[in-house]
Image (cartoon, rainbow, N blue to C red):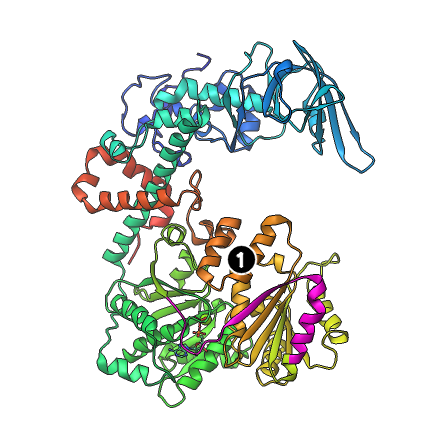
């Protein structure tokens, strides 16, 4: 069997240690069969057998595997292929067809490598088969020269072309066969992540050997009846299917089982955390009534829309309970989210509590601060702003007022989350456009065992499956539509030959008294200075298209004073045009600005472009935006066309999501959760929903969940999400 027995008692003692690596799946049998002698391969702990005891793994290979984090047999069994290669059954040369996928088998000869005149790397060879020879060429894969040698037996897969009477394969996929290895037919081969010096076929056979010898030791954590209900295959079938699928459907079923399990475990953890929070966390109860409602609404210069009313009602239900609110308010740019947040904060103030409003940039914080001040100028509510610009003395004073309760509402960026910032009675935290606000930051705002309520606002709609997973399960309110009197925006995709006419139009509107933005991404110049790109755009415009107009500059590298100056001059109309980077993206509100030119549009995401465009629909005149771009490929062009065509931020976000995937912003890690291994929140959206329902069903029926048959699953949840569950010290 090629495996040394490891069942000695020295292994059994730490049977609960070091199990975190098996997290997609299984607990090992040792979890359940306490101390019983194992019936399979080498004993109950044999999944922890070190890799070097596998046949074909000597100390050198063991070290390579270790570098990849593969220390034990268990690590190998849960090291899933990153891709698959489908090998068609081998075709004899005389049966090949022009440009039809096929695989051929033979020996490599005359392997050589060179550079072409145009600088391409070319590796060429001949394949000698039973029926004759053919030519092979690989472009720009110079490493192949070291991997492929004369005399090697290989299978090549690709689309052959006949040239000068001879068959030729360009960039075929290839697989090396060991001397005694049979020629595969119609097979799906796993492709593993590799480390240097580890040939693919070696990696395959190591994993296969781990699987062949140890699969029975992997424990099934899902009871049979549960699997039947959810149509899941067993863990053993799934592991076989993921490493050595015999067909596409089998691979799909295997994947589904593993993805389901991963998401189920995550959803169980979230459900447990939620239950725990409800048991242990306490937030101030902020109930509303008609009198308070009237007092708050009187402050607003307009009537709330029905959509705003609905969102406020949902929020008020949450705020009226002792369990901290954890709600996401999403609504397109200009949907009118700010008022909803102000309402919630004022409700806290009505209950003699404090509120915090955090914005992603100083500029936006400043704007919120001014809005609040204006709104509350005739009331007794006091608003403070904590910025990096305060002098030490001012800062100390502000913090003191906060602690004594003389400030009711504090506005700032996330930088206000520092030790030393203490509240008298904080009841609600509003986070505007801030997706990276994770579990850790929250802990800072917990005061004397009381948690505040949280309201997170976003104009970048987050698909439901993401809010349920990466964000640790937020409740969601959606603000539909827009307040009345919002202007339409006309969007255009600029071509180089339309530049002149666009700038003619731009100038004409400026002459009519409107204002405009020119947005350009921060591009790293070769000398490393990032300002340069926006500055050179600025200088060009001043000298050419906009010469004679009053043009200002705004970007993230300026000092807070410079930024505030530019914003101020623009808002008073002193500046007609603002050349800016995407610092503009969030929230800036100058109603007279109705024009926008976006340069290098391909560098922005769709949602980002939509946010930018949202800056120019705030007043009484229609907006006009023109995007110039150098889209890379068809997909780039499709994206920009979609942007011009659709004015619906939700639709664009979904599109963005399918073009680019969830991206960094929405990664699980930033929210303090361990990364997912097999599940893909985009691709597996349906499974997310199903796993969530299953999790709620399980937790909802306590008797069933606590039954012995679910013990392995319970253990797995605890092991994997220990850090997030924080079951020990809440409250
Ligand atoms: P966002 O959802 O992008 O944060 P804002 O809250 O900034 O949107 O609102 C956009 C604009 O709509 C603001 O100028 C705001 O004053 C205005 N607005 C909000 N609610 C209403 C309303 N109910 N009636 C009229 N105008 C409104
Ligand atoms: Mg806003």
On the question of residue 424 being in view, the answer is no
Asked whether, in this view, residue 276 is left or right of residue 133, the answer is left
Secondary structure under the numbered disc 1 in the rendered image: helix
Bounds of the magenta segment: 480-508
Q: Is residue 183 above or below residue 444?
A: above
Question: Which of these two is toward me, 11 or 138?
Answer: 138
On the question of residue 468 being in view, the answer is yes
Q: Is residue 500 magenta?
A: yes
Residue drawn 72% across and 63% down?
A: 497
Q: Name the quadrant where ligand 2 sits.
A: bottom left
Label 1 neighbour load within 10 Å: few <14, some 14-19, many 20+: some
Identify the residue at the far right of this view: 117
Residue 50 in percent (x, y) is at 46, 24
Residue 115 in percent (x, y) is at 80, 32
Q: Is residue 377 above or below residue 523?
A: below
Residue drawn 44% across and 49% down?
A: 668
Q: Does the magenta stretch include residue 253?
A: no
Q: Is residue 485 above or below residue 166?
A: below
Residue 40 in percent (x, y) is at 34, 17
Question: Which of these two is toward me, 176 or 138?
Answer: 138
Residue 689 in percent (x, y) is at 33, 46
Residue drawn 71% across and 62% down?
A: 496
Q: According to the image, label 1 marks what residue? A: 642
């Amino acid at each position: 069997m090629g495996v040394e027995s490891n069942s000695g008692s020295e292994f059994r003692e730490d049977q609960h240690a070091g199990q975190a690596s098996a997290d997609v799946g299984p607990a090992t049998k040792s979890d359940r069969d306490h101390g019983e002698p194992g019936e399979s391969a080498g004993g109950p702990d044999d999944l922890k057998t070190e890799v070097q005891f596998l046949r074909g793994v000597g100390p050198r290979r063991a070290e390579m595997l270790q570098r990849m984090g593969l220390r034990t047999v268990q690590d190998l069994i849960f090291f899933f292929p990153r891709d698959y290669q489908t090998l068609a059954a081998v075709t004899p040369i005389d049966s090949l067809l022009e440009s039809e996928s096929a695989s051929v088998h033979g020996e490599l000869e005359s392997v050589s490598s060179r550079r072409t005149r145009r600088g391409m790397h070319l590796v060429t060879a001949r394949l000698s088969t039973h029926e004759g020879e053919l030519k092979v060429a690989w472009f720009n894969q110079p490493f192949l020269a070291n991997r492929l040698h004369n005399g090697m037996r290989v299978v090549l897969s690709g689309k052959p072309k006949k040239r000068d009477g001879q068959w030729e394969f360009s960039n075929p996929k290839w697989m090396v066969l060991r001397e005694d290895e049979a020629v595969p037919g119609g097979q799906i081969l796993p492709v593993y992540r590799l480390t240097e010096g580890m040939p693919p076929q070696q990696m395959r056979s190591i994993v296969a050997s781990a699987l062949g010898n140890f699969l029975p030791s992997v424990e099934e954590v899902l009871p049979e009846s549960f699997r039947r209900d959810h149509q899941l295959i067993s863990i053993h079938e799934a592991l076989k299917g993921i490493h050595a699928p015999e067909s596409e459907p089998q691979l799909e079923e295997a994947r589904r089982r593993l993805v389901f399990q991963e998401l189920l475990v995550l959803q169980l953890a979230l459900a447990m955390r939620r239950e725990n929070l409800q048991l242990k966390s306490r937030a101030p109860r902020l109930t509303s009534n008609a009198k308070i409602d009237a007092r708050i609404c009187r402050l607003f210069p307009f009537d709330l829309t029905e959509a705003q009313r609905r969102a406020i009602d949902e929020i008020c239900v949450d705020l009226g309970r002792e369990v901290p609110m954890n709600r996401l308010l999403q609504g397109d740019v200009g949907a009118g989210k700010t008022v909803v947040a102000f309402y919630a904060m004022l409700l806290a103030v009505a209950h003699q509590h404090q509120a915090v409003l955090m914005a992603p940039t100083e500029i936006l914080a400043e704007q919120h601060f001014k809005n609040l001040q204006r709104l509350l100028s005739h009331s007794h509510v006091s608003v403070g702003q904590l910025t990096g610009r305060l002098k030490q003395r001012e800062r100390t004073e502000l913090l003191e007022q906060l602690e004594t309760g003389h400030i009711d509402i504090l506005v700032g960026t996330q930088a206000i989350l520092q030790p030393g910032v203490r509240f008298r009675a904080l009841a609600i935290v509003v986070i505007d456009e801030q997706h990276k606000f994770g579990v850790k930051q929250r802990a800072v705002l917990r005061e004397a065992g009381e948690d505040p309520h949280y309201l997170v606002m976003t104009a970048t709609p987050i698909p439901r499956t993401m809010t349920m997973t990466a964000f640790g399960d937020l409740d969601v309110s959606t603000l539909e539509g827009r307040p009345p009197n919002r202007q339409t925006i006309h969007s255009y995709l600029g071509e180089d030959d339309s530049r002149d006419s666009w700038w003619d139009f731009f100038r004409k509107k400026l002459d009519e008294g409107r204002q405009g933005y020119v947005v350009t991404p921060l591009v790293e110049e070769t000398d490393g200075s990032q300002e340069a790109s926006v500055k050179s755009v600025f200088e060009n415009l001043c000298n050419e298209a906009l010469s004679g107009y009053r043009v200002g500059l705004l970007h993230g590298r300026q000092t807070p004073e410079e930024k505030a100056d530019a914003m101020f001059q623009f808002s008073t109309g002193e500046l007609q045009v603002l050349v800016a980077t995407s610092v503009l993206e969030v929230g800036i509100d100058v109603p007279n600005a109705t024009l926008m030119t976006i340069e290098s549009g391909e560098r922005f995401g769709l949602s980002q472009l939509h946010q930018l465009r949202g800056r120019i629909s705030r007043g009484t005149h229609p907006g006009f935006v023109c995007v110039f771009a150098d889209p890379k490929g068809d997909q780039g062009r499709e994206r920009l066309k979609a942007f011009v065509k659709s004015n619906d931020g939700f639709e664009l976000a979904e599109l963005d999501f399918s073009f680019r995937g969830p991206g960094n912003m929405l990664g699980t890690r930033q929210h303090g959760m361990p990364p997912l291994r097999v599940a893909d929140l985009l691709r597996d959206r349906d499974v997310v929903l199903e796993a969530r329902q299953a999790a709620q069903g399980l937790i909802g029926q306590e008797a069933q969940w606590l039954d012995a048959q679910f013990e392995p699953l319970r253990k797995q949840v605890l092991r994997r999400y220990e850090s997030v569950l924080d079951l020990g010290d809440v409250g």
